[in-house]
Amino acid sequence: MTSHISSETLRQLGWSDHFQRLAKDQAINTDQVARVLSAHRDQFLVTDGRSEWLCTPSGKIRHHRQMDYPVTGDWVLVDKNAIRRVLPRKNTLCRGEAGSRGKQSGEARREQPIAANVDTVFVVSGLDRDFNLRRMERLLTLVYNCGMTPVIVLTKADLHESPETFLDKVEGLAVGVPVALTSTKDGSGVDQLHGYLDAGQTACMIGSSGAGKSSLANRLHGSDIQATAAVSERVGKGRHTTTSRDLIVMPRGGLLMDNPGIREIAFSKSGDGLEATFSDIRALAESCRFADCSHRHEPGCAVLHAVDSGELPPERLANYHKMQRELGYVQARSEKSADSVEKERWRDVAMEIKRMNRRKKR
Ligand SMILES: Nc1nc2c(ncn2[C@@H]2O[C@H](COP(=O)(O)OP(=O)(O)O)[C@@H](O)[C@H]2O)c(=O)[nH]1
Ligand SMILES: [Mg+2]
Ligand SMILES: [Zn+2]
């Protein structure tokens, strides 16, 4: 009975049929489940929908590989103030760990999970010096490679007379990706994002520091819950304010994750991200003379022809080639498939549940 009530409460935090089914199969009592709202090295703020409390990871988790350590958005098996296990993830936003690659060596980096169980990723860019089409292509590729759905959010529209010109530039970037033109100064365009934050939905923001993510979170929430650069300048804390990742429960019941600025975007997973982001190149490639055309020097290359005719920006093709090379390294190195990692996680969770229940009976 209580477990029925708590699973309804968990639903408001994004617990879906998918998790409910798996929990049932593994005889997990949802009273033992909580969601991670923020993750620090040794302390995790979790919630079960009724209260929030701090947990520490149990010894077992501590000694696990980095991928097994809880991140914001994770569902975890808790025992009072201890996190016993991380429940298998629906998806994981990962990037290559900063600094784990020698310059230009091309060697893939260690995987660094940033967030888990995310429905939509807001790729946030300011319409100021932050605006960079090549970086957007990188972020889109990263998001797709992690099996997530991107939405491009342009902020600071108020800085321009006709900000719509940016829409044209960005819409050519990735076919089918929604683009929102917003300003947190005057609130324009912000409302269209509420649709991604309905009850049970989790959205996560990525983008450089200063892009306007926390300001957007505040606008969407309707109150100042996140510290923005504007605030910290006043209190003299410097420009980089978001030091902790936070999952915020939004008024319409969805959850929004405010991540730290991503300075460097290194890949740690390969997937169909390149194809998804560069669907125009893939479509052109069908007309190349050679099926295995690299679009670098081959005769009869439809992609190079599109560059010559001005249809395809050369910088876009160059960025495609650059990422293709990087992802080649990632693929060569990747060990286990994400699926098998998550399957192992379930087996481990099931064993832990048995142990926990045995302890209770004694
Ligand atoms: N003009 C303008 N400035 C904005 C807008 N959104 C954010 N800013 C400013 O941009 C700076 C960085 O914002 P912040 O939300 O802290 O960015 P974050 O690092 O991505 O979280 C702050 O000084 C904000 O006041 C906007 O829509 N228009
Ligand atoms: Mg911030
Ligand atoms: Zn070609």
Image (spheres, rainbow, N blue to C red):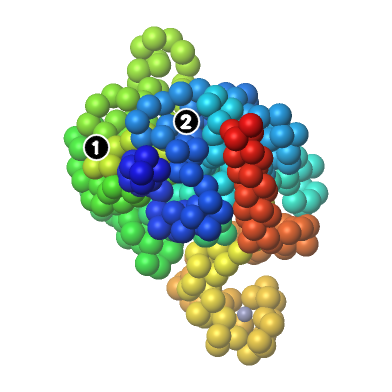
Q: Quadrant of the N terminus?
A: top left
Determine whether 248 is above or below 24 in the image.
above
Of circles 1 and 2, which is in front?
2
Relative placement, left or right, of 3 versus 332 is left
Q: Residue furthest front?
A: 362
Ligand 3 is found in the corner quadrant, namely bottom right
Residue under numbered circle 1 = 251
Q: Secondary structure at mark 1?
A: loop
Give the quarter of the image for residue 186: top left
Q: Residues within 10 Å of mark 2 (few under 14, many from 20)?
A: many
User: What's under tag 1, amino acid-wise?
Assistant: Pro
Relative placement, left or right, of 9 versus 25 is left
On the question of residue 229 being in view, the answer is yes
Task: Give coordinates of residue 360: x percent, y percent.
Answer: 59, 33
At 38% from the left and 22% from the top, the residue drawn is 227
Residue under numbered circle 2 = 46
Q: Residues within 10 Å of mark 1 (few under 14, many from 20)?
A: some
User: What's under tag 2, amino acid-wise?
Assistant: Val
Count of labels in the image: 2
From the viewer's side, name the closer residue of 32 and 38: 32
